[in-house]
Structures are given as C-alpha cells and as structure tokens.
Image (cartoon, rainbow, N blue to C red):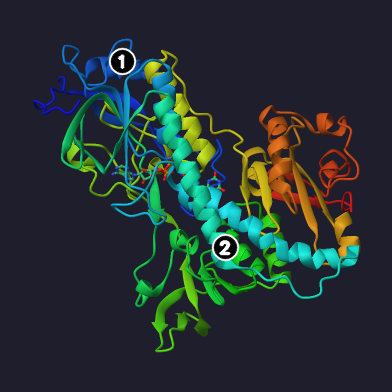
Amino acid sequence: MVSSLAAPKLTTTFSSSTTLLFSKNLPLSLSSPFLSLPLNLTSSVTHLHCRSLSFCHRHRRGFVAASAEPDNGADSARKYDFDLFTVGAGSGGVRASRFAANFGASVAVCELPFSTISSETGGGVGGTCVLRGCVPKKLLVYASKYSHEFDESHGFGWKYDSEPKHDWSTLIANKNAELQRLTGIYKNVLKNAGVTLIEGRGKIVDPHTVDVDGKLYSARNILISVGGRPFIPDIPGSEYAIDSDAALDLPSKPEKIAIIGGGYIALEFAGIFSGLTSEVHVFIRQKKVLRGFDEEIRDFVAEQMSVRGIEFHTEESPQAIIKYADGSLSLKTNRGTVDGFSHIMFATGRRPNTKNLGLEAMGVKLNKNGAIEVDEYSRTSVPSIWAVGDVTDRVNLTPVALMEGGALAKTIFHNEPTKPDYRAIPSAVFSQPPIGQVGLSEEQAVEQYGDVDIFTANFRPLKATLSGLPDRVFMKLVVCAKTNKVVGLHMCGEDSPEIVQGFAVAVKAGLTKADFDATVGIHPTAAEEFVTMRTPTRKIRRSPEGKTDSEVKAAAGV
Ligand code: FAD
C-alpha cells in the first residue's frame, strides 16, 4: 500500500478553454453560513488553463466519470494504491468515502488522532459536527434548557424543596463518553464499508500522492475534506480568550462570560451558558444579530433572549482583553470596558484548514479566505483533486457536507454526474428560543420577486398561559404574489427546528399558499399557525419605478 512514486505525469496544457467555476458570493460571514440559496449562489464563468483536452470537453458537458474513463490527469497505465484517498474523516469525507467504497472503489481516508480541541495535530474520526459542533453543542443545549423548564413547571403545580443544582463535571464527562462512543461508531462505519482508515496528518505531495506522516499513498483521485477551525482575531490579550472548541470542554462552568460575535454559534452558546445560570454578555459589531437572516427573526430572537437575561452590547467591537492577578478578565471595546469576566469567548467565524496542506504548490486554487475553489461537481482546479464540505466554504452545514460527499461519490464512481442542490436548504439556530427557517427571507424574496405577500403570527404559546413566563412565538410565510408559491418559511419559538424540517419538504416541493391553506392543522400546536394564516400582514408591490411599496394589512392570526 505504501509506495514511493515517480513524478506524476500531467497531460499537455490546453489554454483558452472555459469551464464553470463555482464562486461563493454570499452575504454572510463564515460564522453565519445559513442562507445560501440559489439567488446568492453564483456560478461565474472563468477562463482557466485546462489540464487536458478531454477534461475541458467533459467539463463543457459537465460530467467527469473517473472510474469509467479517467480524465482526472491520471496515467491510465499506472497502478494506484487507491481509487480514492480522502484527507479528513468529518461529515463530508466519511460520506464520500463510504459511498465510493459501496460503489466498488478502493478507498482510504486519513484523519488526525482524537482530541476534543482541534489543531494541526488533533482531530478525530467524525469531525467537527460529531466532536466539536452540532452534537456536543446540542447536548449542552439540552442540559441548559432545564432551567427554563423548572421555571415553567411552577405554574403547573410543581414545587421543589430546594433549587435544582447543576453539576458541570457530570455533564462534560457524560458528553465526552458519548463523543468516544460516536467516534467509535464512525470508525466502524468506515470499516464495514471496506474503507482503509489511516491515522495521521495528510499532505498532498503531487496530484496523485498523499503523504501521511512520512508515508506516501497514491490514488487516482484525492478528496480534500479537512473542514475548518475557529478563528480568534489577533487583539492584545487574545491568548486569554477561548473558542467554541474550548467552550464545549471547559473544566468548570463560566460564572460570567463575554461572547463576541452575532452569528448562530454565538447565540447558541449564549443560550447554553445563560440556561446553566452564567451571566452572559454578547458583543456584536453590528446593530443586529444573525446577519443574513430574515430581519423580523433577527429582531425577535434578540428580544426574546434579552427577556431571558442575556445582555446584548451592539455596535461594540473588542479591542483588548486584560487579565488581572485574581484571574478575572476585562474586555475593552470601542465603547468602554466591561470587567469581571471569568471567560471571554470568540465566535467570530471559522477558517478553512488549508494551511500546510501542499495545495498552493499543486496549483489548487484557493479564494482569499483560503477556501478551496471548486466547480459544480466539487472538482478543484487540479483534475484529480476534489473538495467537499466546509473547506470549500459554500454552505457550512453538516447535511450540506453530506450531500456534497454523496454527490461526489456518484459522480466519480457511479457514472452518475450529480451536482449538489443548494435550493431551499433548511437550517436552524439552537438558540433559546430556537429558530428554524427554509427558503428566502422577506428581504431576499422582495429582491428576487418584487411582489411578495407576507403572513406573520406573533403569539403567546399555550404553555406560557400557565407557566406565566413572557415567552412568545413568531412565525412567517413569504409568498411570491405572482405564483402564490411559499418561497420562505421562518419560525422562532419552541420546537421550531423540528417543525420547520417538516415544512421544508413543502417549500422545497414548491407548494403554494393555497396548498398550505388546504392542509388541516394539528390542534393544539404552534405549528398549525403555518396552515391557518389567512390574511396577509402586508403586501409588498414593486412600483413601476422599481421601488417597493408596502401595504400594511391587519396583523394575521394574532
Ligand atoms: P469537518 O467535520 O470539520 O471534518 C474535517 C476533518 O478533517 C476533521 O476531523 C479534521 O480533524 C480533519 N483534518 C483536518 N486537516 C487534516 C489533515 N491535514 N489530515 C487529516 N485529517 C485532517 N452544522 C449543522 O448542520 N448543524 C449544527 O447545529 C451545527 N452546529 C455547529 C456548531 C459548532 C460549534 C460548529 C463549530 C459547527 C457547527 N456546524 C453545524 C457545522 C458543521 O459542524 C460543519 O459544517 C461540518 O462538520 C462540516 O463537515 P466537513 O466534513 O466539511 O468538515
């Protein structure tokens, strides 16, 4: 399996051909990767030097079948160790490797040794989602929600002799045991699919060779799925700050924490620590949280989180962190200094893991943020090298990395050219209250369609009537006036991610407001509002001059 290789032979350079390159043009930062739907995704035509005549021809047809007839820069006479070598066993890498092996390809994947904190030397099979993202985060969200539920319970007759206490070390120990179990399951998934797992750091040394800690492996195709890592800006005292990796694995619960950033990760951690009774301050550079989300959702979630005790410092950027002898931290911003923090967390975005991978030397094109540029089939500028998931910075979500990995395996090894479909990707923010959304925001819909009908409901949920808590729910349908199609659906309130996952099928299927109206509700639920909102809150019409007027109607469903 280990081989030392002759220099790879690339076919003759062929110039002045055109191929489609995917380019990211999203309005959101790395930390807010959610709303990346068709109108935001642009495919720009770029002139490249094609590596081979056949590559260019095939790209014009839009299909590359490496297994059927390799046009991936491979020397057909040459014997490779593997059909596919994947660097990084996170969501995208595991999915692509497993599917490729199921299609009959010989596949190896390399991954860094397990660590709860990611680094150049630490990672683990399962990747960010399983070890430092979605899963541990959601477990901590579950832990933190109890405090609200204890508060709710009093109105329903529950009495406690003493206040419930939380033990942080039990939570973290149980969470870490679960991560060990999950990483084991992912290893088995690879093993059962016949994928060779190699522990170590992968580096590309030529278009068909990967070096893993000094051993060389050759492959007809190489997949880069190395994801990204949190980014902390370089300000004085930044060494005292923590990132999301560390926040999920702290030795003790923060007493008072500053969270810097207004994206989904910042809001989720604010909810976690607030629910676990830390004092939480969120510092955001802009006026509002969740850039790129529907404006009303942005306002609503911030208001509800404030009601639950989280303090937002808007238009406040960090300038320095000062550590005192007693261990406490102060955060200096453009507006002043806030003292007494036990922890300061940056949730200011993530950077693709493309450093020291050997990509630039290979001619793999990166964008200005270091993300790998790929075409619609996830192929890089080097024909034998492909990339999926966060490292390409398209839509940085686990289900999207899975979709891209699956599509890639079909394209290369199943003779079935498959482009990932980025339309109507639903997403959630596990803030408290949580958000679920699919399709276009009101602002995006107005931009795209001009004439739009908006239906909203803002109400006190049934549970709050007895709990006595000031909880509210906000729901919104965005309807294209011309076609009557529901093009956007948004909710902030209990269970919204679960509810919106179901409705996402309807939005993706292009169902109309009439279809929603014809659906019988489930009573009593909050979700039934989505099929009972009859009167538009406003009708937005583009005037002949191209300006937009808003005709405000009676609030619907309140
Ligand atoms: P990753 O899962 O990051 O996997 C990359 C792997 O490559 C890692 O295991 C890494 O160790 C390995 N690696 C890196 N370099 C090398 C190398 N040189 N050699 C070998 N291996 C290497 N998404 C959601 O959909 N829902 C959520 O609720 C959600 N919550 C999140 C919460 C947090 C705090 C974070 C940080 C992310 C969250 N995400 C969520 C995003 C999600 O985790 C990512 O989109 C997803 O993990 C991307 O998968 P990937 O395969 O591209 O990369």
SS at badge 1: helix
Amino acid at circle 2: Thr
Res. 234 visible in picture: yes
Q: Is residue 264 above or below residue 416?
A: below
Q: Residue at x 28, y 19 (%)?
A: 55
In the picture of the structure, the residue carrying the numbered disc 2 is 170
- The verdict on label 1 being within 8 Å of ligand 1 is no
Amino acid at circle 1: His
Q: Earlier in the sequence, mark 1 or mark 2?
A: 1
Q: Residue at x 42, y 40 (%)?
A: 90
Quadrant occupied by the C terminus: bottom right
Q: CA distance from mark 1 to mark 2?
A: 59 Å
In the picture of the structure, the residue carrying the numbered disc 1 is 57
Q: Is residue 31 above or below residue 62?
A: below
Res. 291 visible in picture: no
x and y, in percent, of residue 96 in the image: 42, 28
| Horizontal side of residue 541 vs 254, given as left or right | right
**In the depicted view, which residue is nearer to us: 279 or 21?**
279
SS at badge 2: helix
Q: Residue furthest left?
A: 6
**In the depicted view, which residue is nearer to us: 309 or 440?**
309
x and y, in percent, of residue 398 in the image: 51, 41
Q: Residue furthest bottom?
A: 325
Quadrant occupied by the N terminus: top left
